[in-house]
Structures are given as structure tokens and as C-alpha cells.
Amino acid sequence: MRLSDNFGRKINYLRLSITDRCNMRCVYCMPADGIDKLGHAEILSYEQFLLIAEAAVSLGIEKIRVTGGEPLVRNGIISFLEQLANISGLKQLVLTTNGVLLPEMAQALKDVGVQRLNISLDSLQPAMFSQLTRRDLLPQVLAGIAAAEKVGLSYKINVVVMRGFNDNEILDFAGLTKDHDCTVRFIEYMPTLKEEDWRSLVVSSKDVLQILHDHYCLHPVDRGALAGPAEEFAIDGAVGQIGVIAPLSGHFCQDCNRIRITASGQVRTCLFSDHGFDLKPLLLPGNVDNVARELQRLVHDKPACHTLNSNTAGYSPFSMAQIGG
């Protein structure tokens, strides 16, 4: 079955945010003192998430990404991921993490069927890392990346580029791909918290690519059928790849193929929209067909694009930990 919206976009990618808890406090994600956390009774159970996943896959969802918050802080996640991986028809199971808990969990993630990690890492410099994350955990993250490599777990590194903070590290990050079989993706800063001066932080993907072209010979790389919105390249002779993601300057909404489920069961068909729908009342044992019908209805009404480039952007400030990174 093909799941598509009113604009003919094929929707085959589901993001499940299983928790709003996180062991970091990244400056672009949440305030220094954190967020008002959901009560345990408000967060969907693993059984409810599995029901949503089964309904989504029955509609043609081929890729599921598990996110948070930081998903690895939730108890029981390994067993949950194993059950997700066993859903018939699912082609890709991937997970986004900050890497802190990877040293002890990488092997288990590989064993239960997680196919790839996206690891959020915005600085390779200890002082800047601590400033951006408000935590002194860079050694643990680097150890987590090493653990993923050791067990043969494919990974991408996501770098949110911020002017005046880590934009002087673009070449350092790109250089990682020379000897590491990974993809480093540079992501334009997005104003989820709606700071007054947020535009001053944005480094466009065009500017990132210019810096890279000035120092390296890059060639384009073909993306897979279930790839996200990144443009991908490789440095001549490198074993890894480089990607750029341009939600602001590139406005890739015309190719958007995803929907999101928050930890409390809200469906978001666009990250930058206040319009959601509470699936929780439908998440009863055996209610797969009704959940599938509701997902079809919601996807049909998916908006054409976000309004980030508008002076009247139509969304309220939010923490990515509350929606799903």
C-alpha cells in the first residue's frame, strides 16, 4: 500500500520519539534548566509504539527512526528495538543518539537489528563541546563512536553548524571522512526556540560547501531510495562521505517523506507546525486498522511546506526533545 499526501509525496519514513528525557542540554534544543518533563503516565508504552509502527508499516512505511530526547536513556529499549526490527515489511531501523551511552550499548544495538546510528556531535573541541551541550561528556561520545566502529555498526555524525561557535570546525569534521567509513552531515541551524537573533547563527549549506570546495576536491554521491534530505559528496580518496542539509536555504519540503510521533503520542506531519493529533485514545490492543486509517487521514492533510523563511512563521517555540530530534 502506498501512503501519500495531498501533494503526491510518498510518505515512507516514520520517526518515533520514545522519551523527552536527555542527558545533555544542548543550547539549540532546550533551555539550560531543561524542560517540563512528561509524567511517566503521559509517555507512550512500548506496546503503544509498536502498535503505531505496525499500523504505519501496513501503510507502506519502510523506514523507522527511533529518537528522543536521548532514546538510550529509556529502560527496556533494546528489547523494544528488537521487536521493531521484527515487524514484517520494515526495511530500515535506525536510531538517533548523542552517543554518551554507546560504549556499553553498541553491541546490543547491532545484535537486535539496528542498521545505522545518527550521532549528534557539534564540536570536537572539549571546551566548545561543553559550551554547546552544557555537559563535559566529549570523551564518552568519542568512545561511543569508537564502539560503534568496533562492532561494525554504520553511523552518521550530525553537526548543527552555528556561526561564531563551531563554524571553524567544518574542515576538521570533514577530515574525519578520510579515514572513517562514516557520513558527516552539516545541518543548518533551525530556530526551534525562536531566539530573537537566530538568523545570526545560521551558516548556509552553500557557505559550508564553499569552505569544503576551497580545501578539498569533492564529487557528488548517489543517495539511496530511503535517504533523507541531505546532498551528499565525498572527498577524493576518502572512505567516508559528507552531507549538507538545508532546511532554510534549500527548503526541501517538496521531497519530504516523513511523519513524526512524539513521546506522548502526538502526530506531527511537519516539524514546524503547531497542528498535531493525539493518537493515544486509539492505541488499544488490536486496534491496528483504526490507527492506520487515522494515519492515512493525517498524512493526506500534511502541509505543503514549513514557514521558517517567513516573518510570520506559524509555530510556537519548542524543544526538539519534546518533539523528537
Image: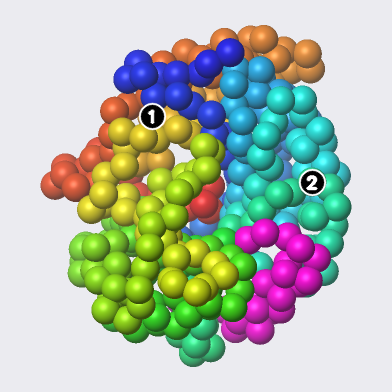
Residue 210 in view, yes or no: yes
Which label is found at residue 113?
2
- Is 246 included in the stretch rendered in magenta? no
Q: Which residue is mark 1?
A: 275
Give the alpha-carbon distance from disc 1 to disc 2, as whole Å.
33 Å
Query: Whole-percent x and y of residue 89?
Result: 71, 25
Give the secondary structure at mark 2.
Answer: loop
Residue 95 vs residue 33: left or right? right
**Residue that sits furthest to the front in the current view:** 237
Task: Residue at the far left: name it.
Answer: 311
Q: Position of residue 86 (x, y in %)?
A: 81, 33
The part of the chain drawn in magenta is 132-155
Q: Is residue 151 magenta?
A: yes
Principal SS element in the magenta part? Answer: helix
Q: Looking at the picture, does residue 320 appear above or below residue 33?
A: above
The quarter in which the N terminus is drawn is top right
The percent position of residue 47, horizontal first and vertical second, equals 78, 30
State whether residue 265 is above or below residue 106: above
Instruction: State the residue at coordinates (61%, 43%).
Output: 65
What residue lies at 53% left-to-right and 88% top-to-bottom? 126
